[in-house]
Image (spheres, helix red, strand yellow):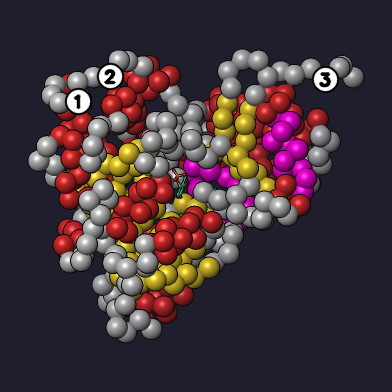
């Protein structure tokens, strides 16, 4: 046995599900003095961002930009469409549905939550039942999390559209694509989504600080019936500004805009179909390794059904305290940071230490994923965690296209 030495020098790797790895090009694009915010390059650049953002969301609808994180986009979407005392329906498949519901409650909105647990997708039939029993159309919107980042469940948005149409219910369909946009296939218009919310720090590869709300004409029709919309959250001047500052209800997030321009160039240079195919291939490599490890040990993928696993994030169960032990080992010894388990157990509960997550969203490639999986193999070896052998071979075969 050789003495244990830390191998953490060299470039750090944050393999957490947001913020994601920031490309060097994005960082370099942001590293500049403050530009003129009244005229010239920044104004032109901002105008160029809007169609390119909408192209990532696959919509011809309107785009509102907020200086804020995902929670800001959650609040913005609701502030424009659902009045206090009105009701929303939330099919929750992990922690994030509850998070959006909590924001709604803070705005005085009534919430009806259908909880599908922590590792299963929603059941559209149960959503249909709730809509059918809402004879008076009190439900004004469904708040649907496409990829729940805590459970790594990917939900079928089109199933909710089908249910709304079948029941003939007029509620808006709102999708949270904060984790999925630019990772898992999402097509706002084709899928019949009325409002989409996202942030810039996951698939869009920019440091946290901007979020986006895309909305169609149907959502705008509801907006104009609102008794009151806060000036700050109002999406109208942001989407159709008479003056440049109205894009942001104040000073522009200057350097973030340069970073976003660079990231969108990378995404559209690669092409959306390739971006989705890359994420899928890399995710399959992660799952292949995890299945081999789990064949003879405690590691388990949280989501069984392949069709409902996100290509952006993978939630894992390994039993307490091994989740925390593994995260600490890879961070201290390899400078490889894994995601904490989220929403699977209360933080004070000892079982909290039995979960972790892998982020594989945005600026990731084959060698990074193999390094991530190799780091996990080393961590499990160091901690003597029982596991099936051949996980890295299985992942490499997927990467190799075999
Ligand atoms: C990250 C995330 C959020 C919250 O975003 P913040 O930027 O942390 O506010 C909400 N929903 C989903 C699905 C997410 O992945």
Rounded to the nearest angstrom, the CA distance separating label 3 from label 1 is: 53 Å
Residue 46: horizontal and vertical position, in percent? 21, 31
- Observer able to see residue 287: no
Q: Residue at horizontal 13%, vertical 24%? A: 39
User: Decide: marks 2, 1 in contact (CB < 8 A)?
Assistant: yes
Within-10-Å neighbours for mark 1: few <14, some 14–19, many 20+? some
Q: Which residues are magenta?
A: 301-330
Q: Label 1, secondary structure: give it.
A: loop
Q: Residue at horizontal 54%, vertical 67%? A: 116
Q: Is residue 83 left or right of residue 286?
A: left
**Residue of label 1:** 37
Rounded to the nearest angstrom, the CA distance separating label 2 from label 1 is: 8 Å
Asked if the magenta segment contains residue 67, the reply would be no
Q: Nearest the camera: 393 or 4?
A: 4
The mark lying in front, picked from 2 and 3, is 2
Q: Residue at horizontal 44%, vertical 38%? A: 202
**Residue of label 2:** 34
Q: Which mark is residue 4?
A: 3
Which of the two labelled residues, at mark 2 and mark 3, occupies the earlier sequence position? 3
> Within the image, what quadrant is residue 382 found in?
top right
């Amino acid at each position: 046995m050789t003495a244990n030495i830390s191998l953490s020098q060299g470039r750090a790797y944050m393999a957490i599900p947001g913020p994601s790895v920031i490309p060097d090009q994005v960082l370099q694009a942001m590293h500049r003095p403050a530009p003129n915010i009244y005229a010239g390059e920044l104004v032109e650049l901002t105008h160029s961002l809007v169609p390119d953002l909408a192209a990532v969301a696959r919509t011809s609808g309107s785009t509102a930009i907020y200086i804020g994180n995902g929670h800001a986009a959650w609040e913005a979407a609701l502030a424009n469409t659902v009045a206090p005392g009105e009701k929303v329906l939330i099919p929750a498949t992990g922690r994030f549905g509850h998070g959006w519901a909590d924001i709604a409650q803070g705005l005085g909105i009534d919430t009806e939550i259908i909880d599908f647990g922590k590792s299963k997708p929603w059941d559209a039939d149960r959503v249909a039942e709730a809509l059918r029993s809402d004879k008076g159309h009190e439900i004004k919107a469904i708040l649907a999390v496409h990829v729940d980042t805590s459970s790594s469940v990917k939900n079928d948005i089109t199933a909710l559209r089908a249910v709304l149409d079948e029941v003939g219910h007029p509620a808006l369909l709102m999708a949270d694509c904060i984790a999925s946009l630019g990772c898992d296939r999402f097509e706002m218009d084709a899928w019949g989504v009325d409002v989409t919310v996202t942030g810039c720090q996951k698939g869009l590869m920019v440091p946290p600080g901007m979020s986006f709300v895309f909305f169609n004409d149907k959502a705008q029709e509801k907006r104009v019936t609102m008794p009151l919309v806060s000036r700050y959250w109002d999406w109208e001047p942001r989407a159709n500004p008479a003056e440049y500052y109205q894009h942001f209800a104040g000073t522009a997030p200057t350097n973030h805009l340069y970073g976003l321009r660079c990231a969108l160039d990378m995404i559209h240079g690669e092409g959306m179909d390739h971006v989705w195919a890359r994420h899928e291939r890399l995710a399959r490599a992660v799952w292949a390794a995890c299945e081999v490890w789990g064949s003879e040990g405690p590691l388990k993928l949280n989501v069984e059904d392949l069709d409902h696993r996100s290509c952006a994030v993978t939630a894992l169960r390994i039993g307490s305290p091994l989740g925390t032990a593994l995260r600490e080992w890879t961070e201290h010894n390899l400078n490889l940071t894994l995601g904490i388990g989220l929403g699977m157990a209360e933080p004070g509960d000892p079982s909290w230490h039995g979960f972790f997550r892998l982020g594989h969203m945005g600026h990731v490639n084959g060698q990074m994923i193999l390094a991530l999986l190799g780091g996990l193999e080393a961590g499990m070896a160091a901690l003597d965690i029982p596991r099936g052998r051949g996980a890295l071979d299985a992942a490499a075969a997927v990467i190799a296209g075999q």
